[in-house]
Image: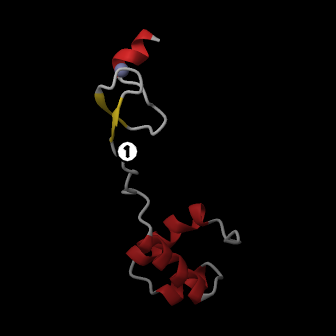
Amino acid sequence: MRPSKYDWKRLDPRVDAMLAEGMRVTQVAQALEMRVQTVRDRLSYRRRRPPQDAPKPAPPPLIDRSCLNCGAGFSVRSPFLRLCPTCRAEC
Ligand SMILES: [Zn+2]
């Protein structure tokens, strides 16, 4: 994605304030000396990606294994662990 030529961190609050005052997007764009489409694009971009509630990635699923050393069954989240917790503790 090419970098925006506008400093949206600074502009977003001004856009919000003007919209809150009841200004139309066309008037906001005029006040900021921007193209109307640029403001519209920014507003729809922000609607698509709300900054607050970004979902956290889920932890990897548990993998059922039997220990390579003693054969006991155990569950781990890493595919690289092949020994049960007891045998790993004894290493
Ligand atoms: Zn073991």
Taking the view exactly as shown, the residue that stands out farthest to the left is 73
Instruction: Give the position of the N terminus as an image quadrant.
Output: bottom right
Instruction: Name the foreground residue: 4 vs 85.
Output: 85
Task: Give the residue type that dot 1 points to.
Answer: Pro
Instruction: Name the foreground residue: 71 vs 64.
Output: 71
Color encoding of the figure: secondary structure
Instruction: Tell me if the residue at label 1 has its CB under 8 Å from ligand 1.
Output: no
Q: Is residue 78 shown left or right of residue 36?
A: left
Above or below residue 64? Residue 42 is: below
Instruction: Name the foreground residue: 87 vs 28.
Output: 87
The total of numbered circles placed on residues is: 1
Above or below residue 70? Residue 3 is: below
- Residue at image position (63%, 87%) is 35
- Residue at image position (39%, 38%) is 77
Above or below residue 86? Residue 83 is: below
- Residue at image position (48%, 85%) is 25
- Residue at image position (45%, 39%) is 79
Residue where numbered disc 1 is placed: 59
Q: Position of residue 40 (x, y in %)?
A: 51, 84
Quarter-wise, where is residue 19 in the image?
bottom left
Q: Position of residue 44 (x, y in %)?
A: 46, 79
**Which quadrant of the render holds ligand 1?**
top left
Q: Is residue 46 shown left or right of residue 20?
A: right
Q: Position of residue 14 (x, y in %)?
A: 52, 68
Disc 1 crowd rating (10 Å Cα; few below 14, some 14-19, many 20+) is few
Quarter-wise, where is residue 90 in the image?
top left
Quarter-wise, where is residue 83 in the image?
top left
Q: Please tell me whether mark 1 sits on a helix, a strand or a loop.
A: loop
